[in-house]
Image: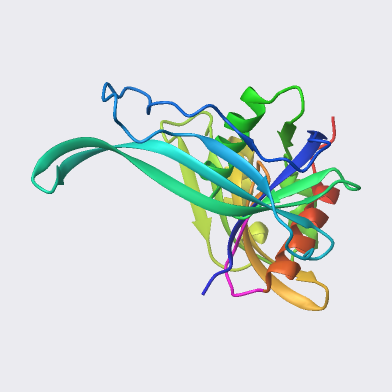
Amino acid sequence: MPTGTFVLFDIVRFPDTRRPIRTEPRRPRGSRDEEADPVFTELRFTRQDTVAGFEVARVTHRRGVHVEGFWHGTPITQFVEQKVFNAFFRLDDRALIAHTKKEIALAAADALCDEFSEVLELRNVELDFGQIIPIAINVIGSWFKGMRYTNIRSEAAFGSQINRDPEFLRMSRLGNHSNLVVVMNFGGEQIEVNLSRDGSAFFMGDYPVDVCLRFVIDLRRYRVTP
C-alpha cells in the first residue's frame, strides 16, 4: 500500500513555545445553521519520539464540504469533514513536512498562518524539474499545464524514459510541468514517486515514513532558485 503524500514547506516563523494553537471556531462558510458543527484548524505538539530527526506535531483540520443528499431522511447540503495528520518539523533546517493530501496540507497551512501570522509563516517549496529529470533513473510520467498555441489546456505522457522521446520535448516547450513521476536512487534504494511542482511527493510504494521524510527534505536541493 502506498505510504501517501508528503508536502514540504519552508519555515519562516514558528512558535517559540509548545502550546497548541487553534483558529477561532466558526460556522462553515455559507452555512446559516446556528447549530452547525464548527470548523477550525489546530496545531498541537506531541511528545512522540523524533522520526528521522523530525519533531512531530498533530494537525486537525475541519472544513465544510458541500453535498447533495440525505441524512436520516433529512436533506443536507453540507457536512463538516475532519482530517487529522502528522506534521514533521526540524527547526535547525527550517523545514516542515505534512503527511496528508496536498490540498488538505495547503488549506490547513493557510488557515493557521492567516490567523497566527505573528508567530507562524510557512512557504511552499517550488521544485525545478529541469534538475530532477537528468538524475532520475527513469521518467515514467508527466503532466503539462498552460499549453501554448493550442486549444488543449493540459496534456499527460506516460511510458518509460519518456524524457528521451521527441514528443515529450515538444510538450515541454509548449507547457509547464505540473507533475512528474520518476524513479530515483536514494539511500541505496529505488524510490518511485509522483512529484508536484509546488513541493509535494506521493510515494507509489510502501516505504517507511523515515525514508520518505529524508527523501522529501532532500528535494530542497532541486528547488527553483530566485
Quarter of the figure that contains the C terminus: top right
Picture mark count: 0
Residue 137 seen in the current view: no
93 lies left or right of 142? right
Which x, y percent locates residue 60? 54, 46
Which x, y percent locates residue 63? 43, 37
Which x, y percent locates residue 50? 79, 63
Q: Residue farthest to the bottom?
A: 188
152 lies left or right of 33? right
Which x, y percent locates residue 42? 58, 40
Q: Compared to 202, does 189 lie above or below?
A: below
For this rendering, which residue is in front, 106 or 225?
A: 106
For this rendering, which residue is in front, 146 or 219?
A: 219
Q: Residue farthest to the right?
A: 92
For this rendering, which residue is in front, 164 or 200?
A: 200
Residue 118 seen in the current view: yes
45 lies left or right of 170? right
| Residue that appears at 60% across and 47% down | 59
| Residue that appears at 26% across and 25% down | 33
97 lies left or right of 69? right
Q: Compared to 72, does 164 lie above or below?
A: below
| Residue that appears at 74% across and 31% down | 120
For this rendering, which residue is in front, 125 or 95?
A: 95
| Residue that appears at 51% across and 75% down | 1
Magenta region: 201-207
Question: Residue 105: which quarter of the image?
Answer: top right
Q: Compared to 150, does 200 lie above or below?
A: below
Residue 192 on the magenta segment: no
Q: What sort of colour scheme is used for the picture?
A: rainbow
